[in-house]
Amino acid sequence: MLEFHIPSEKDRDLFLTESKYLAYEYYYSYSVIWGDAIGLTICKTDTALYMHLAVDDVFLMPVTDNMQKAMQDLEEHCKQSGQRFQLECVPTEQALEMEKLGYTIEHIRNLDDYVYESDKLIKLSGRKLQSKRNHISQFERKYTYSVRPLRTEQEREECYRMASTTWLENHDEGNEDIKTELGALRRTFDNWDHLGLVGILICVDHHLTAFTVGEIIDNNLAIVHFEKGDTSYIGIYSVINQLFCSMYLSDVHYINRQEDAGVEGLRKAKLSYRPDIMVEKYRIVRKP
């Protein structure tokens, strides 16, 4: 039977260190930022790295070069332990491989990642992105603002307070999703140097107005973990998105801005940037 444990810093090298997959769940930062919230545990064998999410009682895809053996071992573990055999967030290529092995696959649209070429988000060229350029022009005409790298602990605390205030103003204080989000942001800032994160903040008239937190995996992939702006400032999200990509991600090919979780407004916003790739994710179960 597989033996799972809570991941720690010594397990860092067990996760992907270069962009083998575009899906963001398979990188070490995911375990640090979201691990507590989702009850993440891991098991490493000679065959694969296995990951289990207690909050939904599901597994992520085994990270392996031998999918057939990895899946057989996982099935055997579930039979012995009584855990449910169900996988989530499996990218298309691996899901199709699993289908050939006899499993049932189901596309879960709300979990698909939005991936963009960095050049597109920096230049915002073409008619379809004209509205983004207009938003930026409006912002630049209307406001006196400054942009600087997000580096110090004091700046991170200021960003955390801003996010807390904004989220709690717009939601019920008892909202579990907001508590989860704030907890993830707290862990992000607490592990800033450990994770090698980068970010920027924007101030309008010396007032913090927006911030972004991201991570460069390698020259092929970067991940945007958090982006928060005060929407009372017209165009703020268009501005911080473009500036962050320009300042830090111009040498990276793809930028993963994660899923929309089925939130209508978020889906509309992410689609409005015309993603170059939708990283489709699948649920995997045994055939009935």
Image (cartoon, rainbow, N blue to C red):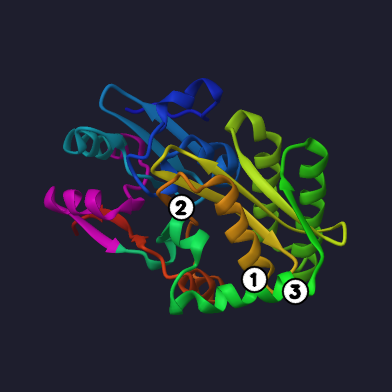
Is residue 99 shown above or below 33? below
Residue, far right: 206
Three-letter amino acid code at the position of disc 1: Ile
Camera-nearest label, 2 or 3 = 3
Q: Amino acid at mark 3?
A: Arg
Q: Which mark is residue 136?
A: 1
Does any portion of residue 235 appear in the rendered image?
yes
**Cβ atoms at labels 2 and 3 below 8 Å apart:** no
Residue range highlighted in magenta:
78-106
Residue toward you, 103 or 269 = 269
- Residue 148 x %, y %: 73, 47
Q: Relative to residue 249, is residue 140 drawn left or right?
A: right
Q: Which mark is residue 141?
A: 3
Disc number lying in front (1 or 2): 1
Q: Nearer the viewer, residue 245 or 185?
A: 245
- In percent of width and height, residue 118 lies at 46, 55
Q: State yes or no: residue 189 in magenta.
A: no
- Residue with the mark numbered 2: 255
Dot placed on the residue nearer the N-terminal end, 2 or 3: 3
